[in-house]
Image (tube, rainbow, N blue to C red):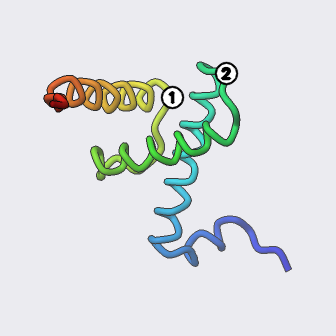
Amino acid sequence: MCQAPHRLLPQLTSTTVFRLRRLQRRTQIKQLLEQTTQTERAQLNVLAIKLERLLFRQFPRDYGYLTNEALGLKLRHIVKDILTAKQQTPTMVAK
């Protein structure tokens, strides 16, 4: 028999809630990417997984719900860090 939602929530472990939040974040990232680019769905899924992983590593305490604006700012921060790190690394010159 179906239970009311408020009775189901206490049964969820913290790990399950954590995984659900990360899955929601991944879906939110994918939706933001779909709005801005015309890329295949499979590529967007892979990119969303990678960005979510980077987001979690850089901001581990912020795994709750974020608005689209806040998520966009954090993703811009991550991309900016990646681009500046890539520019600062010296390239190897072949002899």
Dot 2: few (<14), some (14–19), or many (≥20) neighbours within 10 Å?
A: few
Q: Indicate the position of residue 92 as horizontal and vertical percent values.
A: 17, 32
The quadrant of the image that shows the C terminus is: top left
The quadrant of the image that shows the N terminus is: bottom right
Q: Are marks 2 and 1 in contact (CB under 8 Å)?
A: no
The answer to which quarter of the image holds residue 82 is: top left
* SS of the residue under disc 1: helix
Q: Indicate the position of residue 89 as horizontal and vertical percent values.
A: 16, 31
Residue type at mark 1: give it.
Asn
Residue on which the image places disc 1 = 68
Query: Looking at the image, which residue is at 30% across and 27% down?
Result: 77
Q: Nearer the viewer, mark 2 or mark 1?
A: 2
Query: Looking at the image, which residue is at 61% across and 21% down?
Result: 37
Q: Indicate the position of residue 10 as horizontal and vertical percent values.
A: 55, 74
Dot 1: few (<14), some (14–19), or many (≥20) neighbours within 10 Å?
A: some
- Horizontally, residue 71 falls left or right of residue 31, namely left
Circle nearer the N terminus (2, 1) = 2
Q: Number of callouts in the render?
A: 2
Residue on which the image places disc 2 = 38
Residue 56, compared with residue 43, is above or below; it is: below
Residue 8, compared with residue 75, is above or below; it is: below
Residue type at mark 2: give it.
Gln
- Horizontally, residue 22 falls left or right of residue 84, namely right
Query: Looking at the image, which residue is at 63% across and 32% down?
Result: 31
The answer to which quarter of the image holds residue 93 is: top left
* SS of the residue under disc 2: loop
- Horizontally, residue 90 falls left or right of residue 38, namely left
